[in-house]
Image (spheres, helix red, strand yellow):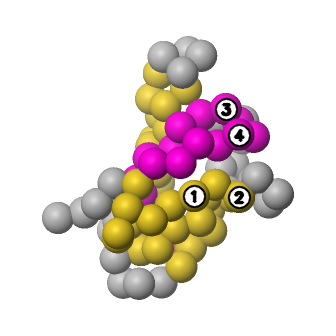
Amino acid sequence: MPETAIAYDSVNHVIGMGPMHGRLYAFDPNLGSWTASKIDALGDRSTVFHCMDFDTVDGVYVFIADDFSTWAYKPASQTVQ
């Protein structure tokens, strides 16, 4: 079963969750809405060990996938779509 990781994106002011099955989910507390972003290169992988953080310098989510590879993902726009 995939594990869920959560990190605050201080650049776009959203809460990132996942990745689960190759998708990163984001909650925008200002709008009260969820969006999902498919990460094509990730395939159907998910996070392990609840390991994800947001790097404010490069504006990327950093996480460990279930094949134990390390990933960095930068949302394409101001909100994850």
Residue 17 in magenta stretch: yes
Residue type, mark 2 in image? Asp
Tag 3 near tag 2, CB within 8 Å = no
Quadrant assignment, res 1 = bottom left
Quadrant assignment, res 36 = top left
Q: Earlier in the sequence, mark 1 or mark 3?
A: 3
Q: Earlier in the sequence, mark 2 or mark 4?
A: 4
How many neighbours does mark 2 have within 10 angstroms: few (below 14), some (14-19), or many (20 or more)? some
The residue drawn where x is 44% and y is 29% is 34
Tag 1 near tag 2, CB within 8 Å = yes
Q: Is residue 56 visible?
A: yes
Q: Earlier in the sequence, mark 3 or mark 2?
A: 3
Q: Measure how far apart labels 1 and 3 are at the Cα level.
A: 14 Å
Residue type, mark 4 in image? Ser
Q: Which label belongs to residue 55?
A: 2
Q: Which residues are magenta?
A: 6-19
Q: Which residue is mark 3?
A: 13
Q: Measure how far apart labels 4 and 3 are at the Cα level.
A: 5 Å
Residue 37 in magenta stretch: no
Tag 4 near tag 3, CB within 8 Å = yes
Magenta stretch: dominant SS?
Answer: strand
